[in-house]
Image (tube, rainbow, N blue to C red):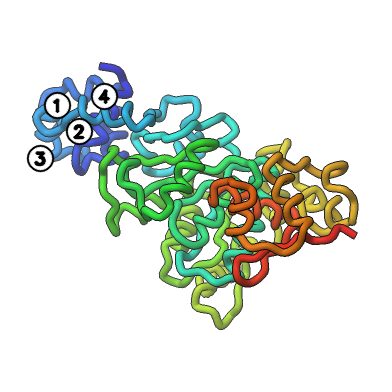
Amino acid sequence: MTETEASIALNMVPNLGPVRMRKLLEVFQTPERILLARRAELRAVEGIGEELASAISNWEQEIDLNQELALIEQFGAHVITRASPVYPRDLLEIYNPPILLYVWGTLMERDQRAVGVVGSRKTSHYGLECAKKLSFQLAYAGLTVVSGLARGIDTAAHQSALAAQGRTVAILGSGLMALYPTENQALAEKIAASGAVVSEYPMTFPPSPQTFPYRNRIVAGWGSGLLVVEAGLNSGALITANQAIENGRLVYAVPGQIDKPTAAGSNRLIQQGAKLVTGAADILEDLQTFFPRLEKSPARFPGSPGSPSSAGQSVSETGPPLSKTESVVIELLEEGEIDLDGIVSKTRLPTSRVSSTLLALEMKRLVKKLPGQRFVKLSLL
């Protein structure tokens, strides 16, 4: 049995958890030795009672490891342990880092340079627009955007990082085969194709009200900072922010209207010392200390004041080149205003691809979205 296989088995033992796992490793050194230990030896470890010692020593009767390994392979996922070089180093510093991570997609060394983005599920138009703009710019600057794949701000953060052709990692509160919310399945597939969808839970583990707050510690601990775009006073985003503070992370918050309940939590964070954010540069100037190669000048972001596209110069000459799909959509919009269905029909591209392309063009200030899902090309004159 390999170390990874032993870690998977231990991760499936009910009520073990990362803190007790750490206690066991201090005594037995490796996951394999834990599984081979006698019940009396396990019981002697601090925090391991009779019931848990019995569950570990009888793990082969309680856990179907071969089935779990087969599900991982069939799904196309893989598992990394704390010893893996791509396991987030900052995550190792928190009190209870996951025993292991199930990964759908690919984690890279550059994902160590990350920032969490969280916010309300029931968000305002203002909150969504802020999440789109900031996540796009952070990903464009070279940071990996980490969020929870939830509705609202999380979804906007992931979509915008993808539109910037940057890296994004989604952290689930369930197993990879029990993804929630189900309407984000297509988004998860896109994230896995160019980044990673990650869970600490076994493949078919169901979501519950307890798993999501617990998942949030990973979002809070993965990177060097956490951005709260919009959050109510009792929201999960505020819980995540408190976890980030407890773990010594930099916390940023977007100010909201004082009469909006969805902004009460993020405004409170600013009162308590979180850095007020009006643009990605407010975050990047701090993180530049940790990651010197980050692009921190707002003038270099697509669509920012003073950037080539907003100064009336040709984007293709002075800014980032348009992708083939972006060029096709822009050429179509040269003919005039058109709705989303019309673009899909004329380009014969998937709706999801057209939507992400339009979002990228919006962030580059080349396209404007009008009421009724209609779009028009912006003049650069």
As measured in the structure, the alpha-carbon distance from the residue carrying label 4 to the one carrying label 3 is: 20 Å
Can you tell which of label 3 and label 2 is closer to the viewer?
3
As measured in the structure, the alpha-carbon distance from the residue carrying label 1 to the one carrying label 4 is: 18 Å
As measured in the structure, the alpha-carbon distance from the residue carrying label 2 to the one carrying label 4 is: 19 Å
Q: Earlier in the sequence, mark 4 or mark 3?
A: 4
- Give the image location of residue 57, x and y in percent: 12, 28
Q: Amino acid at mark 4?
A: Ala
Q: Residue at x 89, y 56 (%)?
A: 311
The dot on residue 309 is none
Q: Earlier in the sequence, mark 1 or mark 4?
A: 4
As measured in the structure, the alpha-carbon distance from the residue carrying label 2 to the one carrying label 1 is: 7 Å
Determine whether label 4 and label 3 are within 8 Å by CB.
no
Instruction: Please identify the quarter of the rendering in which residue 132 is found.
Output: bottom right
Can you tell which of label 1 and label 4 is closer to the viewer?
4
Q: Amino acid at mark 1?
A: Glu
The dot on residue 6 is 4
Q: Earlier in the sequence, mark 3 or mark 2?
A: 2
Which residue appears farthest toward the bottom when viewing the image?
259
Could you tell me which secondary element the residue under label 2 belongs to? Answer: loop
Q: How many marks?
A: 4
Instruction: Please identify the quarter of the rendering in which residue 79 is found.
Output: top left
Is residue 224 in sight in this rendering?
no
Determine whether label 3 and label 2 are within 8 Å by CB.
no
Q: Residue at x 63, y 55 (%)?
A: 343
Q: Residue at x 62, y 64 (%)?
A: 129
Can you tell which of label 2 and label 4 is closer to the viewer?
4
Taking 311 as reference, is 87 left or right?
A: left
The dot on residue 51 is 3
In the rendered view, would you say 284 is above or below 203? below
Which residue appears farthest toward the top when viewing the image?
1
Determine whether label 1 and label 4 are within 8 Å by CB.
no
